[in-house]
Image (cartoon, rainbow, N blue to C red):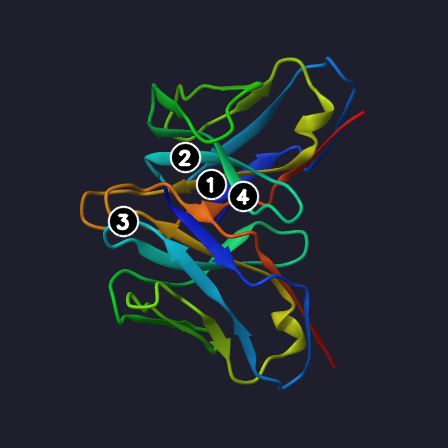
Amino acid sequence: GNSVTQMEGPVTLSEEAFLTINCTYTATGYPSLFWYVQYPGEGLQLLLKATKADDKGSNKGFEATYRKETTSFHLEKGSVQVSDSAVYFCALSPSNDYKLSFGAGTTVTVRA
Amino acid sequence: NAGVTQTPKFRILKIGQSMTLQCTQDMNHNYMYWYRQDPGMGLKLIYYSVGAGITDKGEVPNGYNVSRSTTEDFPLRLELAAPSQTSVYFCASSYETELSNQPQHFGDGTRLSIL
């Protein structure tokens, strides 16, 4: 079946530090890959997505590249801010389906 | 710009009580979903709907029911609340076509405690 594994948190960083959250997946075919972000007390919001191998999704300074050879979609940001404190979810949608499979989420706290 | 609206935001139920979690969207999305979010577990799909009058089970449907009488509304019903249903519930919607997977839009969630 389809599954997503992402690095466990929580992750605590200082402002301007580099952030990486690892995400690997298991799926047949060519799934679409997503990163969603959940700010405190809110629902999930789409952060970025990639729909085919070697695509790079980017938004708000975050980037992730769809690596089919390593079945990975790691999220990176070069210089985090306090406002980036949130829970980040990696997710996939199979090529023949629209339902999402989510990772467990990684809580990121950025300190001033 | 309401998007996906869920009510109530918080609720405490006693074991055995019933309730309906409301969800409405104003984006004319054809697909709607209900998830539950448990600590450290990500989101699990409870039920989904691909259009008015059509619903189907997700990963964890037991203890829940849904209906989709209109495009806008997708209520989730708990008939006999159990402590295992304590969770945060999220409703989402998307506009799906045959061309590509579209992002889902989420409501702010309903935090439900069963005591």
Whether A108 is drawn above or below B64: the answer is below
Q: Residues within 10 Å of mark 1 (few under 14, many from 20)?
A: many
Q: Residues within 10 Å of mark 3 (few under 14, many from 20)?
A: few
At 52% across and 32% down in the image, what residue appears?
Answer: B23
Q: Position of residue A22 (x, y in %)?
A: 50, 68
**Dot in front, 4 or 3:** 3
Q: Given the image, what chain letter belongs to the residue carrying mark 2?
A: B
Q: Which residue is mark 1?
A: B92
Q: Is residue B66 left or right of residue B18?
A: left
The residue that mark 4 highlights is B43
Residue neighbourhood size for the residue with mark 4, other residues' Cα within 10 Å, grouped as few (<14), some (14–19), many (≥20): many
User: Could you confirm whether marks 2 and 1 are on the same chain?
Assistant: yes
Secondary-structure class at tag 2: strand
Element marked by disc 3: loop
Which tag, 2 or 4, sits closer to the chain's start? Answer: 2
Question: What amino acid type should be assigned to the residue bearing mark 4?
Answer: Leu
Q: Which residue is mark 3?
A: A28
Residue B5 percent coordinates (x, y): 54, 39
Query: Around disc 2, counting alpha carbons within 10 Å, would you say few (fewer than 14), some (14 to 19), or many (20 or more)?
Result: many
- Disc 2 marks a residue whose amino acid type is Met
Mark in the foreground, 4 or 1: 4
Which sits earlier in the primary sequence, circle 2 or circle 1?
2
Residue located 43% across and 53% down the image: A91
Label 4 – label 3 distance at C-alpha: 21 Å
Residue drawn where x is 56% and y is 63% of the image? A7
Which quadrant holds residue A81? Answer: bottom right
Quickly name the residue at label 2. B32
